[in-house]
């Protein structure tokens, strides 16, 4: 070991992003392991590695005794006093037990252990970095597609985009740059396993935070998100500043802000609606772009009955019920939509009930 070793450690730590102390401690551990393989080695020994010049020594603690019975753990009083006359029986002496010609075998073992320790340290650093980013958005390059799984290069590691988290209308090929939502980060023996998503509602929320400064700054609050990935989404927003229009801010000048998000999600349509503390108003807003005549709510059961103009019924319900379904997800209310004509039709049972009530009063 030499000054060249110290320089090599410094270069290595910069490349791998680990602290020099981690590398030096790993070297000491690997040298100690190499020493313990030596014949007659002291199993209680320890290694000291000089951080400045790279020189190392192996020390063993031995007890001072009158007569040595275990040379591995004991040292005679006479030998101890050759080092320092102040030693007495029962004292502990640190003895240099570095074997001769130890360098070559030690260097080989140290190299193998160091490589392993560095891999572990690097994996730990990467895990901590991405674990702290769970629930955040990240940009990566599609590296390869294996079966139905898409592997995305994040720079320091790769992430998995499983089939269930892929937008059905999208196809992925190597070199594509995509934004994803970090769903979960697991620690494994092969390094961190990062699961990402293109379908998670959180992705839409984070995209709006990136695109709309007022959301990032907290002036506008994104209250709820409902998605049918690749098809259509709805978000509900409210402004904490009366002078700022929440919906207008999210749409952006000439619709540019929302269009950037639509482009990122490959033309997924996005409805931006105004949240309101009044459930009836909120439900009416959630059915946008349909116009609503009236909303009756049952707050105990969280159900609502919505009346829309006849010509707006299909728009309110949406293709295959999509608009109504997303509105229900967004508001977390059950929504029953009727046209004005349907609402005016009185069911026979209701008429009979009214007649019976009338007879009773008479």
Image (spheres, helix red, strand yellow):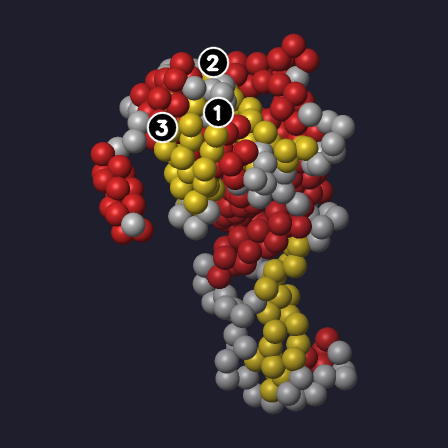
Q: Which of pointers 3 and 1 indicates the residue nearer the eye?
A: 3
As rendered, which of 139 and 167 lies closer to the eye?
A: 167
Which residue has dot 3 on it?
Answer: 343
Label 2 Cα neighbours within 10 Å, binned few <14 / some 14-19 / many ≥20: some
Look at the picture and state if 274 lies above or below 27: above
- SS at badge 3: helix
Residue at 52% over, 39% down: 279
In the image, residue 330 lies at what x, y percent?
47, 34
The dot on residue 267 is 2
As rendered, which of 237 and 73 lies closer to the eye?
A: 237
The answer to whether any part of residue 159 appears in the image is no
Spatial CA distance of label 3 from label 1 is 13 Å
User: Are the residues at dot 2 and dot 1 in contact (C-beta closer than 8 Å)?
Assistant: no
The answer to whether any part of residue 88 appears in the image is yes
Q: Mark 2 vs mark 1: which is more N-terminal?
A: 2
Label 1 Cα neighbours within 10 Å, binned few <14 / some 14-19 / many ≥20: many
In the image, residue 7 lies at what x, y percent?
70, 38
In the image, residue 362 lies at what x, y percent?
29, 50
Q: Locate residue 298: give its quadrant.
A: top left
Q: Which of pointers 2 and 3 indicates the residue nearer the eye?
A: 3
Q: Mark 3 vs mark 1: which is more N-terminal?
A: 1
Which residue has dot 1 on it?
Answer: 292
Label 3 Cα neighbours within 10 Å, binned few <14 / some 14-19 / many ≥20: some
């Amino acid at each position: 070991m030499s000054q060249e070793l110290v320089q090599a450690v410094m270069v290595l730590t910069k490349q791998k992003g680990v602290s020099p102390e981690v590398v030096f401690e790993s070297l000491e551990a690997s040298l100690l392991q190499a020493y313990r393989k030596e014949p007659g080695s002291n199993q209680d020994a320890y290694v000291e590695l000089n951080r400045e010049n790279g020189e190392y020594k192996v020390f063993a603690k031995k007890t001072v005794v009158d007569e040595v019975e275990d040379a591995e753990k004991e040292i005679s009083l006479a030998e101890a006093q050759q080092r320092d006359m102040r030693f007495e029986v029962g004292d502990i002496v640190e003895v240099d037990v570095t074997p001769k010609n130890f360098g070559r075998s030690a260097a080989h073992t140290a190299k193998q252990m160091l490589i392993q320790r560095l891999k572990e340290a690097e994996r730990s650093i990467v895990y901590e970095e991405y674990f702290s980013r769970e629930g955040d958005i990240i940009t990566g390059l599609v590296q390869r597609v294996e079966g139905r799984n898409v592997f995305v290069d994040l720079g320091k590691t790769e992430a998995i985009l499983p089939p269930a988290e892929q937008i059905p209308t999208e196809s992925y090929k190597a070199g594509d740059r995509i934004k994803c939502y970090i769903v979960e980060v697991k620690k494994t023996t092969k390094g961190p396993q990062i699961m990402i998503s293109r379908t998670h509602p959180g992705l839409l929320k984070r995209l709006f935070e990136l695109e709309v400064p007022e959301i990032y700054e907290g002036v506008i609050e994104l209250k709820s998100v409902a998605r049918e990935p690749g098809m259509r989404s709805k978000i509900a927003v409210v402004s904490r500043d009366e002078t700022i229009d929440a919906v207008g801010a999210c749409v952006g000048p000439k619709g540019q802000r929302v269009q950037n998000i639509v482009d990122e999600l490959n033309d997924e349509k996005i409805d931006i609606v105004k949240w309101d503390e009044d459930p009836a108003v909120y439900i009416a807003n959630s059915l946008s772009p349909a116009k609503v005549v009236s909303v009756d709510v049952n707050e105990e059961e969280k159900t609502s009955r919505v009346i829309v103009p006849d010509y707006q019924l299909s728009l309110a319900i949406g293709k295959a019920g999509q608009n109504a379904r997303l509105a229900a997800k967004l508001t977390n209310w059950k929504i029953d939509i009727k046209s004005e004509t349907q609402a005016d039709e009185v069911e026979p049972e209701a008429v009979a009930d009214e007649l019976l009530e009338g007879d009773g009063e008479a």
